[in-house]
Amino acid sequence: MQASSQAFSDMAATRNSTLDDTFYKKADAFFAANSKVGLTYDDITLATLYSEILPRNTQLDTRLADGLQLNIPAISADMDTVTESRMAIAMALNGGLGLIHYNMPERQQLSEVSRVKYHVQGLIQDPIKIAPDQLIGDVLKLIEEKKFGFSTFPVVDEQGKLLGLLSGHVVKPRYATKKVIEALTPRKSVHTITKKELGKDPIARADNFFTEHLGIHKLLVVDDADHLHGLITMSDVERITLERKAQFKPARDAQFRLVCGAAVSATRNAFGELDRGRILEHVSALVERGVDVVAVSTAHGHSKGVGDTVKVLRDAFPKLPIIAGNVTSAASVEYLADCGANAIKVGQGPGSICTTRIVAGVGIPQMTALYVCSRAAAKKKVSILADGGITKSGDIVKALTLAQGVICGGMFAGCTEAPGDVVEISGKMYKHYRGMGSLAAMKSGSAARYGHEKADTTRKVAAEGIEALKEVCGSVDRVLATLIGGIQSGMGYLGAKDLAELRVKARYIRVSPAGQREAAPHDVVELKTGN
Ligand code: XMP
């Protein structure tokens, strides 16, 4: 750029209009001026600023604690209809984080964490296997029932030893009465590799293999005793090779494993006291499995039980990143930070399945809560996470002007990677989504999160969440691509190259009910939604 045009551009960037300043306020002035009313995402909008930033060049990495850095500021909620290992793997592969819920036996939660930490991208660790004495007709039935999109299967004996590969070419109705053993490609003709041979970069190794072996699309992974340990397909390898060039890299730990979080509860013993021994045992086991962060998840984080749990964990694990919550006040952020939490979940009652505000009459609309908490968090040098109530990417942009990350439940509950089966109702496909404070979820284990005992659910206990359905919305990759596109657009409009700049540059104004109507499509017959 020439000197004169550089000077002109600098002038444009720094030009200040007092008129703008009268209407569009920075956070401190705006929220102080609106201190008598609780505001949420749709109550406000952000003013745009001079920009030389292209959305695609914006950076979305965020540091939640020492040792916990994400490449996108998105976390999937620790809810039993949202995050188990499949969701956590998808979130981490996209640069975010999944928090594995605790409505399951501790042993199972540990293996869910292990699945994430030992996930080898592109390696199907537990492929569907076929027994040699099954009929081809049985295999066809299985494909039909489970709606598999593939028809080639490894064949193993009762000990899991590889016997061969049943190729899709022979899985046809005309061979229905033939036995698998008669139709399989025998072991000696099947291409295999050992885990050791896969080395540090299994995808590169498999990519080379497929180039060298013309027409071979499947590679089986075995141990030294020829037991089957996995399957790599050429189409997966090609997809991953493409993804490696993507802007946002997977979120990994220092040993190159995907990051994973797990929720823990402030468990009490039979006498109603905090069960320190059990909490420590649980978290020690999680740490042993390589968990990157634990979330002490409750509905009321500003309480002795949560504070004491965080203190116990901080003393026992000085370096372990700890998320705690949920809260909506400055005092509660300071309390949890003093107890040793690194990131605080902000949100009481904004969630799409929450009824806390209706049932208990408490909670603060999200933008006001985030502002108040963000100022306390800055003082204590901890981060905050905007938890619940996010329904569109614009809400995330607004949340990120005050918070270091967002936690979403409803946005991911309809994804393929969320736990639970798809149900069809009147020709539409849905997945179950329920509040952790719903009666059903509390019976499955989350009662402590709402200050109840599991057994209380048979007595008079008020549910603080509902059971609902979410329309199926495809893969997490797709949903996140749309959300990330929206966040980057917002940052482009504000001339913010990264999230730190977004927080500094944001200016707000309130929106009237007419302004809210104006903000959504109106006065047209909608043919296609934006997504
Ligand atoms: P979204 O809006 O993303 O909200 O669906 C997810 C967040 O809601 C919280 N949560 C609950 N809050 N009753 C509540 O008041 C409940 O039953 C409940 N279940 C989940 C939680 O913070 C989650 O991340």
Image (cartoon, helix red, strand yellow):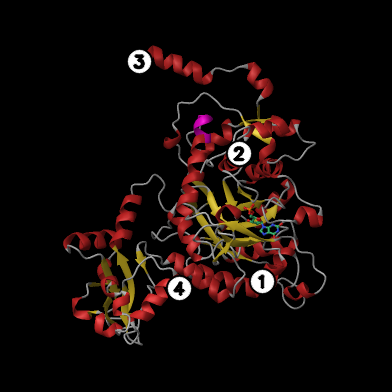
Quadrant for ligand 1 reads bottom right
Q: Relative to the observer, which residue lies in front, 213 or 380?
A: 213
Residue 401 left/right relative to 231: right
Q: Relative to the observer, which residue lies in front, 509 or 297?
A: 509
Residue 186 left/right relative to 77: left
Cα–Cα span, label 1 and label 4: 31 Å
Residue 313 in which image quadrant: bottom right
On the image, numbered disc 4 is attached to which residue? 145
Q: Nearer the viewer, mark 4 or mark 2?
A: 4
What quarter of the picture does the N terminus occupy? top left
On the image, numbered disc 1 is attached to which residue? 445
| Sequence order check, earlier mark of 1 and 2 | 2
Mark number displayed over residue 2: 3
Q: Position of residue 67 (x, y in %)?
A: 49, 54
Residue 180 left/right relative to 55: left
Cα–Cα span, label 1 and label 3: 65 Å
Q: Which residues are magenta?
A: 490-495
Cα–Cα span, label 4 and label 3: 67 Å
Q: Position of residue 295 (x, y in %)?
A: 60, 60
Name the amino acid, label 3: Gln
Cα–Cα span, label 3 and label 2: 36 Å
| Sequence order check, earlier mark of 3 and 2 | 3
Kindly tell me whether residue 352 is visible in this rendering.
yes
Q: Nearer the viewer, mark 1 or mark 4?
A: 4
